[in-house]
Amino acid sequence: MKKIHIVSFIMLAAGIFLFISASKDTGTFHTFTQALKSESPIKISGQLSKDKEIYYNPEKDPNYFSFFMKDSEGIEKQVVLLNKKPQDFERSETIVLTGNMVDDKFMATDMLLKCPSKYKQEEIYVRSEVSL
Amino acid sequence: MNSLNYIGEHLWLGNVGHFLVLLAFISLLCAIWSYIKATNLNDQSWQKIGRYAYITHGVSLLAVIGLIFYAMLNQFYEYKYVWEHVSPDLDKRYMFSAFWEGQEGSFLLWMFWHIILGFFLIRKAKDWESPVMACLSGIQAFLASMIVGIYFTDTFRVGSSPFILVREFFDGPIFDNPEYVNLIEGQGLNELLQNYWMTIHPPTLFLGFASVSIPFCYAVAGLWTKRHTEWLKPVLPWTLFTACILGTGILMGSAWAYEALSFGGYWAWDPVENASLVPWILLIAGLHTVLVAKATGQAIKASYLFFILSFVLTIYSTYLTRSGILGDTSAHAFTEMGLEWQLILFIFTALGLTGFLFLKNLKSISVPKDEEATSSREFWMFIGSLVLLFSSILITYSTSLPVINKIAQIFNPEFDDMVINDPIEHYNKYQMWIAVFVGILSGTAQYLRYKEFNWASRMKKVASHIGGSILFAAVLTYLATQWINAVAWQYILLLFTALFGILSNIDYFINFSKSNAKAAGSVISHVGFGLMIVGIMASGLNKRYLSSNQFAQAELVNGLDLRKNITLLKDEPMFMNGYWVTYTADTIKKTIKEYEVTFVKKDDSTGEIVESFILNPNVQYDKKLTKVAAQNPSTKRYAFRDVFTVISGLPPEQIDVESAKEIADTLNWKRYDVKVGEVLDLEKSKIILEGITLNPANKEYQAEEDDMSAGVQMSLWPHKDITQKIDVLPMLAYRGQFLYRFPAQANPVNTRIMLADEFLQEVYQTDENLVYEDVVIKQNETAEFKGYKIHVVGIDKEASHPYYTKQEGDVPANILIKVQAPDGSVADLRPMFLLRNNQTNNLKDYSPELGLHARIMFLDPVNEAYHFSFALDNRADVTIPLMIAENVPRNDYIVLEAIEFPGINFFWLGTLMMMLGFGFSMFQRLKGN
């Protein structure tokens, strides 16, 4: 057996090891119910509750943003993100949060928004001086 | 569609375009067939046909591109592609950006580069032309199929034509109008993409993508013609070229992200970034195996595989970024094109054909009998390539999770989507080990020789140099940790290996290669890699949010301090991490609002200013000024650190009109009718009305001729702090028939003050409130009216007046008068006298500055006298109608994110050196030929 094969073999083994440990970095989307039981931070995906208060007052604290979100099971919880309010937040279709439950609030460390794409619901612009 | 006869469409363009696209496609098929024949039969005449076919293809496609540009420049909005990407207000310099903003345009850009590279190959590839061009034509055919736009059924189509009409794509009542073309206008280029990066980044990146095809084509040609060693020589400069261009393209993307986008960094392991990085890494792996193969005959198979993988993953990356499959995991918004199946077919065809070729010819690839020695350079270079392969497998696996999810759900619909919990940490964690190995190998392997046969005699020298480099690197690492806060041993190790890589390469260059120019390229690139790692570590580990105010109270999550933003009230300095930071000014230019933020650092003991600079982050509104479309950062650059700032928040009413309306609806306005000199006592403050100002200055209002504007100067004295005085000047302005309101806000007392619309009529009065008096003046004489000296200059027969339109038989005349007010200010007035149908009429003139109204009632030619009628505005006793709202949210602040990136220039320097190294080596190789 060639030395290069031995080295390749060792690297392959290391690779498989890395792969297995890398897959620990992945998880699935959870729910608020699961978040209550979890110790470590988890990911939750859900929809913004548009009828509930969206609070952000940078005059008082630019790093405190709170809103309500419904998860995939329809459970609604208050979410607190200690960061700025992202742009176009109200337009988001899906919100993906990373964080954990503290008391009855979900404290998010990271938030990702999915917004409707630019062309989907576009209507044809009509020049303003013409009425149809 | 219906059978209306539409007016104003330019259908010829689409027809010619469609024809040319088809011609381009068919000539490609012809080129493929001819070049295959030419390769298999080794026949010159077939090669000639292939050549002409490819040239026909190239010329037609260039014409297609020309037609699209023609349609875009002339704004033929009946074409969907033009309508989507161009708008009447779009600057001509963004026309290129608009062209490749869309899917079809970017495929055309990609093909454009294939054409250029193809023409080059036809001239230069010599005996490699036929097989290489056959392969390139095949690739090009798949790309061209993306834009042919042939519909087989209503839903099944091949490609998406750039010449499709708006009315063929959308349904709408507007298309019942035969003249709809005149009624529509385009949407234009996304505001985020309106910058120079969008002009230079895509063409470079796509030249990179197109160049990836060339080493792949040579690999295919090598396998096909069984010239397994001959292809190595021509492929080498092409590989270096591709590595340089693709790398530069990727870097431009990260420079764009750092300079113009607001996420604060140059690399985020976003799937779109990863997708273009992986082919590049594989190409670098291929580059190393080709060098090995050329020198020793080893690693030919690996070279084939690396180039095949590099190409296939380029197509795969196109699939990932354009199919919409990345969904939630990427911040990049790409629109779906509905042609995913074509890309999948492309991937499997490429894999299938090359896999078949590879397996079929596997046996004919000769392998040297002697195994490579562990003391040889090729041994460790090969290991290095495997490390790079590893890196790309890991990145591809993690990036492909959405694809894996999709596949798993085909078999098991219940399968839950897998996602990476913390992507950036995940990638960094594994890729840092790759960098550790690259650092070690790039240093060590340089000292070794190919096919080492006399290791015993060299061992001592090599070992002493490696040892010296280790020692030196260890000392440097220690010094560097005084600057870079490497918190874990893994980071210290990474820093050490990077420094070792740098030092050993320099040592090798000076002491082993005798500063040979041939070795310079590789040394420059390897040193660049080390510097890049140092830069990544310095800017990543020592990245510091300046904008965290340690006095602000906030809840902590998992002990992490996540406060990244700070609110700055206008003109109120805030202290943050050593700097006094003040938001001092803002200006509006078109759709961009630029802020001025000053940073001042003072010496603690002496109070002297030791550092000060101004940054100008801005926000960009959409073209209708309805909402903020983008925030553009501003960065202060020092040699060893950057201070990066971006506006991360604004008062809601400045973010979009909806929020502004919402706030306006909640305000509780109260009306006060007051006079100058009066004092109003309100809940939060006393207001003193100081005086009326004509033509006042206002940041948002620029006076034009014939405007009529007035404001009220007032001061507010807060109850909370009676020594504070806040000056405000709300105003109104008439321009033509439009009234513009400029309310004033006294933020410290949360009070907004607006003048009611009738205020202007109080200042600039209308005739019904005026008392006219008659005055008779002779030509060239001066009379006095209530202290105003009025001098008659004469008649101007070239009569004009804003309210006068000439009719047949009119006899009009302007009487020119010069007026001097008691305060010395002067004005020229020209009231008009008009004889129409034997009736006398007059049109008045008015000087808003002087408040004087002048009419000419009668001309007395016998005595050369003019009968005027004058009136004065009553400005001494104007009633000021005020609207005041208290408890108004402040509107004089910005939310700022400020980050310090130490050593980021090492990253840029290092990456640039890597690219420079590739370029340099390429020229060395070409010179050698």
Image (spheres, rainbow, N blue to C red):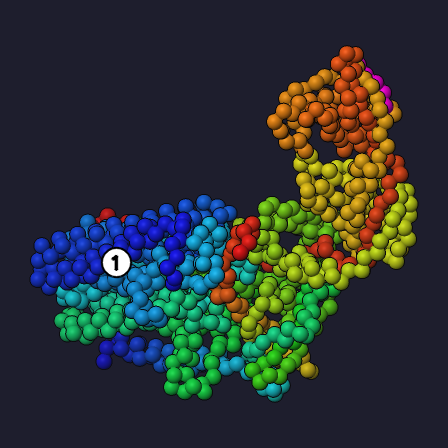
Which residue range is magenta in the image? Answer: B779-785
Q: Tell me the quarter of the picture where residue B505 sits.
A: bottom left
In the picture, measured across the screen, residue B180 lies left or right of residue B884, that is left
Residue B96 visible to the viewer:
no
**Residue B783 among magenta residues:** yes
In the picture, measured across the screen, residue A89 lies left or right of residue B448, that is right
Pointer 1: residues within 10 angstroms few (<14), some, or many (20+)? many
Q: For this rendering, which residue is in front, B173 or B285?
A: B173
- Residue at 69% x, 69% y is A55
Query: Which subunit holds the residue at mark 1?
Result: B
Q: Amino acid at mark 1?
A: Leu
Q: For this rendering, which residue is in front, B239 or A37?
A: A37
Q: How many marks?
A: 1
Vertical arrangement, residue B65 with respect to residue B802, above or below: below
- Residue at 81% x, 26% y is B869
- Residue at 73% x, 50% y is B571
The residue labelled by disc 1 is: B22
Q: Position of residue B60 (x, y in %)?
A: 26, 51
In the picture, measured across the screen, residue B844 lies left or right of residue B811, that is right
In the picture, measured across the screen, residue B245 lies left or right of residue B581, that is left
Vertical arrangement, residue B151 with respect to residue B654, above or below: below
Q: For this rendering, which residue is in front, A13 or B878?
A: B878
Q: Position of residue B751 (x, y in %)?
A: 80, 55
Q: Quadrant of the N terminus of chain B?
A: bottom left
